[in-house]
Amino acid sequence: MNKKLKRYLDETEKTKEKIAQLQEHLRNVQAMQKQDEDMEIIKSIRGMKLPPRELFELLCGLQEGSLVIAKGKESDDTLALDKEDEEMMQEALESEDLGYEMEENS
């Protein structure tokens, strides 16, 4: 067999092995990144120190996509509900007669 051809085949094999190792390393790094991002999200949500009912409503709003994150003049990041969702939540709270009034961010 031609020496050049054999060298190319060897180099191709070595390169494929290196690529496989790097891909595995990349998957591990991405998994660690996601884990750290998840921990930051949990820490941020827990740091809000919301009562259980409000925490539940916040999480439901996030999962349903009805929660809007808006930037305002008073603070860099504020959470606000769409008017329609806010009205629905107010009606639900009033019907349960919890005596809870939602604060509006104006």
Image: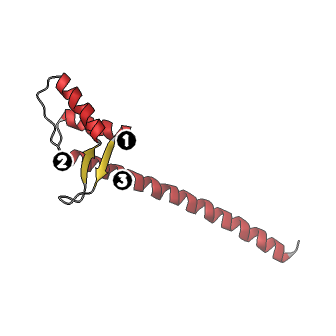
Amino acid at circle 2: Asn
Q: Which mark is residue 105?
A: 2
Which comes before the other along the chain, label 3 or label 1?
Answer: 3
The location of residue 80, given as percent across then percent down, is 25, 46
Label 1 to label 2, Cα distance in Å?
Answer: 19 Å
Q: Which mark is residue 65?
A: 1
| Image position of 45 with respect to 24: above or below | above
Quarter location, residue 99: top left
Amino acid at circle 1: Gly
Disc 3, disc 2: CB below 8 Å? no
**Viewer-nearest residue: 95 or 48:** 95
- Nearer to us of marks 3 and 2 is 2
Label 3 to label 1, Cα distance in Å?
Answer: 20 Å
The coloring applied to the image is: secondary structure
The location of residue 88, given as percent across then percent down, is 27, 31
The location of residue 100, given as percent across then percent down, is 13, 31
Q: Left or right? Give the position of 85 relative to 74.
A: right
| Image position of 93 with respect to 71: above or below | above
Amino acid at circle 3: Glu
| Image position of 98 with respect to 10: above or below | above
Q: Left or right? Give the position of 57 relative to 63.
A: left
Around disc 2, counting alpha carbons within 10 Å, would you say few (fewer than 14), some (14 to 19), or many (20 or more)?
A: few
Query: Mark 3 sits on what residue?
Result: 37
